[in-house]
Image: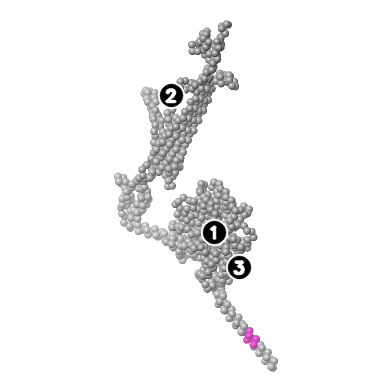
Amino acid sequence: MRQRTIVGEVVRKTILLLLILGMLVFVGMRVYAEEGTPTSGKSVLKEILVDRTPYFTNVKAKIEGQIANYNSFKVSNPFRIVVDMWGVENLIEKDTLPVDSPQVKEIRLFQQDDKVRMMIETTGDSPLPYMVTEEDGAIVVSVGGGKAEKVTSLERGVKPSEKRPEILGIDLEDFPGKSSVVITYSDKPQMDKAEKDGEITVTFKNVKIASNLLRHLDARSFGIPVTFVDAEKSGNDVVVKIKHQKGAAYSYEEKEGTFVVSFPKAPGREKAYRVAEYRVKEVKEGEKPAAPSEVMKGEEGVREEAVPAFVTVDTTRKKVYRGQRISLDFKDADIHNVLRIIAEVSNLNIITSDEVKGKITLRLINVPWDQALDIILKTKGLGAKLEGNVLRIAPLAKLRAEETEALKSIKSKESLEQLVIETIPVNFADVKELEKQVKEVLSDRGKVKVDSRTNTLIVKDIPKNIKNVRDLVKKLDTPTPQVLIEARIVEVSTQFTRELGVQWGGAYQNTSDGIYVSGIMDDNGTLFAGVQTPDPTFPTYSVNLPAAVGQGSGGGITFGIIKPNFRLDLALSALEVTGNGKVISSPKIVTINNNTASIQQGVKIPYSTVSASGTQTQFVDATLKLEVTPHITPDRTIIMELNATNDTPDFGNAVNGVPSIASREADTQVLVKDGETAVIGGILQIRRTESVDAVPWFYKIPLIGWLFKHETVNNDNTELLIFITPKIVEHGKRI
């Protein structure tokens, strides 16, 4: 009996002990739930771990639970990295966590609705390379790069198996004074540069590069000197080809960690923005694809004052996107959350109507934020309207209806507004031509008349349109610019004539036999020996081919052998004439823009014609004439249609005493800058003649052939050059 009592007591104590242990476990689980995990089942951010090195800083946000989605972007002035983690609750008490590493100053945490925002503020204002990845239930942000021992590039997890330099970024930047291609690297690599017309090739020897940097960039639409940037691998080398406008100036600059090719621009560009930025981000095999997204935003530039491209309900207008570049990668994201990201990047306030709702899936890499917004609005059938710095988004049909009602209201108001009459004087323009332009801006009730006597427009319309007419007339009624055209026509001529001739003959007389042979006589038919020949018609010389020498020109040499019965005479004659001439004509003429002007100078040469009515005298012009029509472009370049003629009398080729006309003409269209000189034409005429008078067969005998021939050489060279110098004459200034 006692034994049963003891057994029962043991059973009761055991049951009691089990009940106490169960209560303790339940209470512990309650305490753990209250202290560690919210009862709602959300994922929680429990701690932030920081790994500091001299070259990079790793920020690891440890999350307990499933990471639904996250995205990141960067903000300038100062440079900050922002990471939004959706579906996460923050259990860290401190909102600001100081880091004080070489790359990161501090970390700030914000709880916003159903997300936690982690903002990493870097040291200094300069942008730093960074990478956001997901590793083992944590969001890891790697900031910095360079010569770190553990991480030598921005790609997370790449081990330094080989110590080679790495290309970290290829950026195309556009600023007011220049456009630049900026190539960033970890260690200074060996590089070769090659240049040819319109292309620069930079080869980086034995370097690494992420595959997403090997791409083609088309920059033609940006209107900058750079047109294309191509990056490609060649073995272990990386080749970057920069194509630019032909004739563009450029310079090289090497800074710490960067190589810059700069292209200076002409003054006048006021906007500055980053055209493209590529940073290392590569998805390795086995990694999760783009549920996270990286939003990249270019450096802060001059804010555009014009209405952004997307702010319109007119789908026919051509749009130009110049917003800072951004990358978005979402699946089934709420459209309001996507618009919030765009609002933060664009620094615009965005308000949506009640009809804006739904989810969106998109992947946009490195596009202007205004283009991304435009695509989202088109996809959802929405429109946007900018009012100040507030962007209102609503269905496109609703915005169009509002615009239609607004136009109807304006027209209704204008139809009731009182008409006024004003006179607008016109100073320079043709009042008849302005009348046609003014009619385009008047309302249906408006009228315009012209007073030709005073060159005045009489306009009747509502005050608003009258102001528009005044503004239009002010812009169009400007003095037409004048152009002073200076022409210089230079004609250079050289003449050269040379004659070589010979005369020789001989006489022989045998007095005993009465035989004589003669080949040389004097003018009286007397032999040089003094004996009269029986035949005065006998030729004076055996060879008589002299040069055309005379008094004051040419010369000769005579050789003779004289004996009582034998005579031999040889005469060599030569003539050489050289002449140089230069004629300069410099006509000038002033004309207004787009009007043809003509100037000529010369003589009229008379000549007679015979007809049934008798002999008549007519005239032909021998003049220097310049005819020009200038057109001034907005950049002060002058396009000229030119016709220059130079007709001169040639008395050397006269017919019946009337000289022929030597005509030279240039007809062309040229493009010349203000004050510069252009050569619009040149004619070089070379005339060479050679003539030989000789005794057949004998003149071909070597050496002595010169005794049987007369040679004449003529060289005439004529060169004509025409120079044109246009100058824009400002209104009110002296010419």
Tell me if residue 155 can be seen.
no
- Residue lying at 46% horizontally and 38% vertically, measured from the top left: 680
Q: Is residue 684 above or below residue 392?
A: above
Q: Nearer the viewer, mark 1 or mark 3?
A: 3
Q: Nearer the viewer, residue 105 or 587?
A: 105
In the image shown, does 121 or 55 lie closer to the viewer?
55
Give the magenta part as a residue range.
Answer: 13-19
Q: Is residue 573 left or right of residue 605?
A: right
Does 275 sit left or right of 587 as displayed? right
Quarter of the image holding residue 136?
bottom right
In magenta stretch: residue 520: no
Give whichever of discs 1 and 2 has the lower sequence position: 1
Structural crowding at the residue carrying mark 3, measured as other residues with C-alpha within 10 Å and reported as few (<14), some (14–19) or many (≥20): few
Residue in the image at 54% along x and 61% along y: 128
Per the model, the C-alpha gap separating discs 3 and 2 is 108 Å
Question: Disc 3 marks which amino acid?
Answer: Asp
- Badge 3 is on which residue? 136
Other-residue count near label 2 (Cα within 10 Å), few / some / many at <14 / 14–19 / ≥20: few
The residue shown at (46%, 20%) is 551
- Disc 1 secondary structure class: strand
Q: Secondary structure at mark 2?
A: strand
Callout 1 crowding tier (Cα within 10 Å): few <14, some 14–19, many ≥20: some
| Closer to the camera in the image, 49 or 349 | 49
Q: Amino acid at mark 1?
A: Ile
Most distant residue in the front direction:
563
Nearest to N terminus: mark 1 or mark 3: 3
Outermost residue to the left: 453
- The disc at residue 655 is 2
- For label 3, the SS is loop
Whether residue 479 is visible: yes
Residue 365 image label: 1
